[in-house]
Image (spheres, helix red, strand yellow):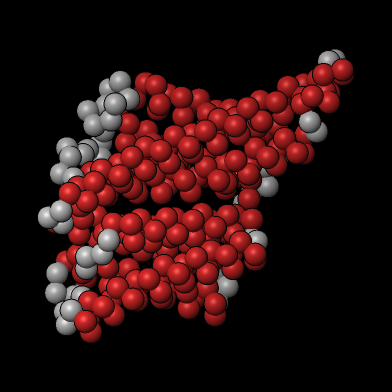
């Protein structure tokens, strides 16, 4: 299932944006964002359908004869099921996780095709996966950093109010509910970016034949950072944590991020 590199990139970009939309809707339950994510995913499915039609009726090769084509067809089926479930049933949990899995399958299929591509653009596409993996991870760390700073500002503002000191500086910090909410929003955006980044990294390591180790400290550290911030979201959404407790947790989560970024990389055999 070969196509132009730019078409693969468009598919993955639109799919990534759809995943972020589904994740935000899963956390905040926003119907407008859900609709946007649905139509973005529909575009992905439509492009896949055109490619499958070309492969089946023009090339005369049903796309299940090789592992790569089978994975592409499998992803197409999963996306179709996801679209149907999203329209007919209000089960956001299964929709989100079906799409996460199908994104991994689709990415693996496209990457394996690129790996076997005889032209230079195949190797370039695999290299671009690595670049995007690193970029998304760093961008997610940026959102987590902003979230940490907002949480720190919340704690300072909270302390000022309790001690009734620093009144003249309070207006510079903003009010407590806004600091709390904006900190949460940054984590909501950062988590799917890091998750997609980790998926890209795993697929890149597999298709590029790199010496990838699941027990590598940096790999485990990235998964730990993701888990810590997912727990933050669970505490906020599921347990109703707000204010000082969740801000303190946010500060602790950021310390885990710093340890992973600066310390685990030193002892990593795979990452820098």
Quadrant containing the C terminus is top left
Decide which of 100, 124 is in the foreground and name it: 124
Decide which of 258, 227 is in the foreground and name it: 258
Q: Position of residue 269 (x, y in %)?
A: 22, 28
State whether residue 271 is above or below residue 168. Answer: below
Q: Position of residue 178 (x, y in %)?
A: 75, 39
* The quadrant where residue 61 appears: bottom left
State whether residue 81 is above or below residue 67. Answer: below
Residue 258 appears in the figure: yes
**How many marks do you count on the picture?**
0
State whether residue 256 is above or below residue 94. Answer: above
Give the left or right position of residue 111, taking residue 6 as reference: left
Give the left or right position of residue 213, taking residue 10 as reference: left
Q: Position of residue 225 (x, y in %)?
A: 44, 36
Residue drawn 34% across the image and 71% down it: 48
Give the left or right position of residue 228, taking residue 159 as reference: left
Residue drawn 30% across the image and 41% down it: 130
Q: Position of residue 190 (x, y in %)?
A: 52, 42
Residue drawn 62% across the image and 52% down it: 238
Quadrant containing the N terminus is bottom left
Residue 101 appears in the figure: no
Residue drawn 70% across the image and 42% down it: 181
Decide which of 128, 92 is in the foreground and name it: 128
* The quadrant where residue 104 appears: bottom left
């Amino acid at each position: 299932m070969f196509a132009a590199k730019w078409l693969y990139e468009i598919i993955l970009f639109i799919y990534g944006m759809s995943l972020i939309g589904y994740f935000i809707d899963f956390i905040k339950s926003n119907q407008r964002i859900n609709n946007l994510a649905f139509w973005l995913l529909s575009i992905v499915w439509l492009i896949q359908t055109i490619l499958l039609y070309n492969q089946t009726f023009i090339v005369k090769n049903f796309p299940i004869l090789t592992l790569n084509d089978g994975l592409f067809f499998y992803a197409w089926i999963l996306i179709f099921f996801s679209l149907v479930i999203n329209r007919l049933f209000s089960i956001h949990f299964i929709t989100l996780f079906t799409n996460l899995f199908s994104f991994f399958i689709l990415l693996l299929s496209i990457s394996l095709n690129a790996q076997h591509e005889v032209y230079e653009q195949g190797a370039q596409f695999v290299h671009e996966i690595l670049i995007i993996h690193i970029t998304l991870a760093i961008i997610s760390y940026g959102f987590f950093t902003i979230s940490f700073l907002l949480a720190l500002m919340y704690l300072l503002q909270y302390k000022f109010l309790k001690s009734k000191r620093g009144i003249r500086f309070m207006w510079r910090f903003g009010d407590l509910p806004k600091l709390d909410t904006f900190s949460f929003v940054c984590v909501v955006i950062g988590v799917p970016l890091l998750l997609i980044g980790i998926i890209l990294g795993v697929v890149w390591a597999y298709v590029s034949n790199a010496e990838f180790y699941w027990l590598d400290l940096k790999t485990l550290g990235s998964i730990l950072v993701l888990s810590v911030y997912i727990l933050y979201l669970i505490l906020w959404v599921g347990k109703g944590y707000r204010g000082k407790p969740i801000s303190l947790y946010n500060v602790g989560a950021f310390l885990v991020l710093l340890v992973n970024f600066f310390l685990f990389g030193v002892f990593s055999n795979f990452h820098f």
